[in-house]
Amino acid sequence: MNYKALKWIKKKHKVFRKYKNSSHPACRRVSKIASWETNRAKYNSEKKLAENIKKDTKLFYAYIKGKATRVGKKNLRFCIL
């Protein structure tokens, strides 16, 4: 997770505390941007991981091991693809 995504998540929490309604237009807008930034940060980190797989195999296998414990070993092949 990068700084920009964390900034939007904090802003989302701040706006929700102000309006206390997730269907308020301001909350919806900030929530959408926060989720977009989070997905973008995840994509960029996975892309960087894939680019450096030859140089840094330890990091790659640590990431895959974490995925296997979260998703389950049966569905691991779908996470890698």
Image: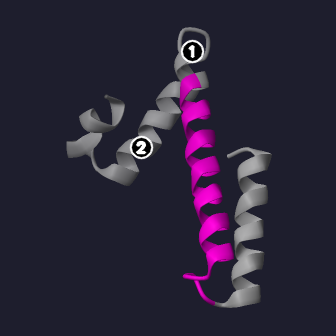
Q: Which mark is residue 51?
A: 1
Dot 1 surroundings within 10 Å: few (below 14), some, or many (20 or more)?
A: few
- Name the residue at the left extreme: 74
In x, y percent, where is residue 49?
57, 24
Marks 2 and 1, the one that precedes in the sequence? 1
In terms of depth relative to the viewer, which is nearer, 29 or 8?
A: 29
In terms of depth relative to the viewer, which is nearer, 57 or 40?
A: 40
Q: Quadrant of the C terminus?
A: top left
Q: Is residue 19 above or below residue 49?
A: below
- Name the residue at the front extreme: 25
In x, y percent, where is residue 28?
59, 71
In x, y percent, where is residue 23?
55, 82
Q: Which residue is mark 2?
A: 67
Is-magenta flag for residue 46?
Answer: yes
Q: Residue at x 71, y 51 (%)?
A: 5
Q: SS of the residue at dot 1?
A: helix
Dot 2 surroundings within 10 Å: few (below 14), some, or many (20 or more)?
A: some
Range of residues picked out in magenta: 21-47
Name the quadrant containing residue 78. Answer: top left
Is-magenta flag for residue 61?
Answer: no
Q: Residue at x 73, y 44 (%)?
A: 2
Q: Residue at x 33, y 37 (%)?
A: 79
Q: Which mark is residue 7?
A: none
Q: Is residue 12 left or right of residue 49?
A: right
Name the quadrant containing residue 76. Answer: top left
